[in-house]
Image: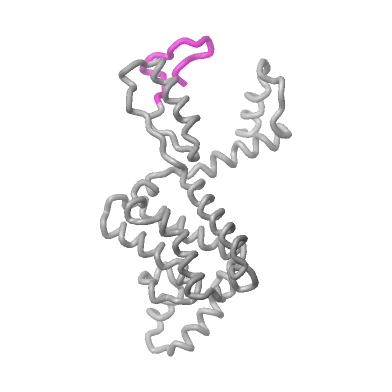
Amino acid sequence: MLLDEDGNYREDDVAVFAMRVHSDNDTRVHNRFTSTQNEIIGHAADGIAEHRPDLGHIIKNTSGESFTLRDEDTSFCGKGLLENGRILSIMADTRHAITEYHDHLGDPDERKKGIDQIMGIIPHHCGDHSKCVYPEHCRYLSIKKDNPDMTEEEVLQKLAETSLCHGGTCMDLSEDGSEQLKNVLIKRFNSKSIDRIAEMAWSNTCMGFWGTVTKFSEGKQLNLDQTDYWFLMLEYCFC
């Protein structure tokens, strides 16, 4: 966006300078992008543009590690254990905690709330709600709050009857298994990393757009560099 079709600088009132690039963890593309900006602009652009990993890729990597853990340890396999749908739910809960903190970035109380949410995700999915402290994120606590006279058995029964996730069932993991799975989350999402992660953008919409372009164009094709084929595909997808 800094150069026009003839390779000339667009001038300061038109050119678009990228100060923050959100992408996956492959920094080579970002480094080439920012170095080209510097070549065009000069020293005034030094040290300004920065790379931020994409939240979607962080979640994807964490999900992949969960699948790897299951593949390497058969004690996680089986009905009621670390099933595909359960991993997706755990990732959704993690993403929800991060995106919610994003709106309150830097607030120490909200930071603690976000970390507490993440710390309690695995115990929550194992039926241990002792780490759940926010009723708005835990159906069990919500039921107890709204029905203070209910017994523990009645709360669990109502949870099983009304829960939309996995029919109210829990993972039947050992204490060691629960700890291993919790460590998968904690090593990425903790007090040292949560602020930087919460600043990340979410590129799923962008990736979805390019996926649609690939679908309409019937995949990546060669020998089209000197044509307007890709420009037409972008217009087609957009419209």
In magenta stretch: residue 28:
no
User: Residue 11 placed where, x, y %?
Assistant: 39, 14
| In the displayed structure image, the side of residue 45 where residue 205 appears, left or right | right
In magenta stretch: residue 6:
yes
- Look at 41% across and 16% down and name the residue there: 39
Q: Which quarter of the rendering shows the C terminus?
A: top right
| In the displayed structure image, the side of residue 11 where residue 92 appears, left or right | right
Quadrant assignment, res 209: top right
User: Residue 38 placed where, x, y %?
Assistant: 39, 19
Q: Residue furthest left?
A: 108
User: Bounds of the magenta span?
Assistant: 1-17
The one of 108 and 10 positioned closer to us in this rendering: 108
Q: Residue furthest front?
A: 72
Quadrant assignment, res 230: top right
Question: In the figure, 98 relative to 51: above or below?
Answer: below
- Look at 41% across and 56% down and name the residue there: 187
